[in-house]
Amino acid sequence: MIAPRTDLTPQALAPKLRRLFDLSAAKIRSIEESREPSQGAPVFTANGRYTSRGWTEWTQGFQFGSAILQFDATGEREFLEIGRNRTLAVMAPHVTHTGVHDHGFNNISTYGNLLRLMAEGRIPDNPWERRFYEMALKCSGAVQALRWSRTADGGGYIHSFNGPHSLFVDTIRTVRALVVSHRLGHVLMGENDRRISLLERAIEHARATARYAVYYGEGRDAYDVRGRVAHESIFNANDGCYRCPNSQQGYSPFSTWTRGLAWAMCGFAELLEFFDEGGGVPPAAAEFERAARATCDFYIENTPPDGIPYWDTGAPGLAALGDWRGQPADPWNSHEPVDSSAAAIAAQGLLRLGRRLRDERHWQAGLAVCETLFAEPYLSTDRGHQGLILHSVYHRPNGWCAGAGESSMWGDYHAREVALYLLRMVEKGPYLKFWV
């Protein structure tokens, strides 16, 4: 369990935040100098060098988005140019990619961050450039919304790349693509010129995720523990009836893959902020808050006291570690790996929910995760290593495992993002949000 704290503040973490971005600069430059986009998107490191793992290229937006976040944090224009030029040259296929559920990952991280910087006055407001970003984001949200499956209860969800039967918990954060597109005034045009609301589809997807991917300790099955999540929810594609939980990257359908848990924590917390501050409050907001509270509580209760989780809370090797919830995580143990990337994502969920609820338990837990993550042995201080955050896991069941001493592109991006979130507070900048 994450140790209760009352003493942490963003200001106290400021030296660690600035050190992180100092180390980050060399790593972004190294990747840019050593890899061409034709080699495929960097996914995770092997012996300290980023490698590709062709699947859906879902990490490319994190690569170029990292450079944009670096500019945001430091004002160093070379990183703006890397992010802007690479977005222009490489990211267009991601805007029209109909075969994936990853639009929020790729396109909000690039086009979305650039539009946000322009809206905040951090970069000059060029009307044609702004419209270029807006058009990309409008199209991305509509294309993402095309991957639609109906549920028997009258709702629906964006189905994963596994097919129309499959709802991934990951997609709760990529649903931002629909929200941003709607915010920019766009709709999805269907057959017979039917106008389909992207906001309504975003809400319905979030409701399906809250109802089927998140558990609430209400006896749904023998493993119904409040706050745990299933990576995948399976539906009968013929009639939309829910069938069962499943897992692709976790240990089992009845255990909790912690990166999936983290996606739910962060995704629901961000959606709640949007509805509070920019999008009106739908009737489903209470469901989203319930899901956010449950998942954040589960993370606090099932993570070692230093805030770094093991890759799955039901992984069988944890039994060999003894009281793994009661002692700091061991990234070098020989039984089950930790997943620092889950920590980077979860920290933002804890912080955003804690701020929204004015709840010190969640807020302090988020700061505690960052305090650990932004220092050795997790922060990579070796300037020859291209990764920023060490001890990340990709797809352990498939053997695609960065593992001890290695990094992932999503882990590095989300560490930069949550560090920027806190740095904005320290420097009294605009609150970091995904919409404009």
Image (tube, rainbow, N blue to C red):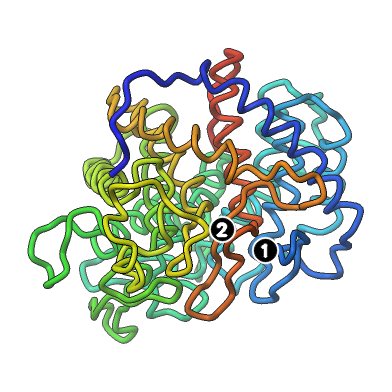
391 horizontally vs 353: left or right: right
54 horizontally vs 208: left or right: right
Q: Position of residue 401 (x, y in %)?
A: 58, 70
Residue at image mark 2: 392
426 horizontally vs 155: left or right: right
Quick check: can you spot residue 273?
no
Q: Is 343 in front, or is 190? A: 343
Say whether marks 2 and 1 touch (CB < 8 Å): yes
Q: Position of residue 406 (x, y in %)?
A: 65, 59
Q: In the drawing, what numbered circle is on residue 44?
A: 1
Q: Give the secondary structure at mark 1.
A: strand
Which of the two labelled residues, at mark 2 and mark 1, occupies the earlier sequence position? Answer: 1
Q: Give the secondary structure at mark 2.
A: loop
- 24, above or below 242, in the image: above
Q: Is 128 in front, or is 107? A: 107
Q: Which residue lies furthest to the left in this view?
A: 219
Q: Position of residue 248 (x, y in %)?
A: 43, 76
Q: What amino acid type should be assigned to the residue bearing mark 1?
A: Phe
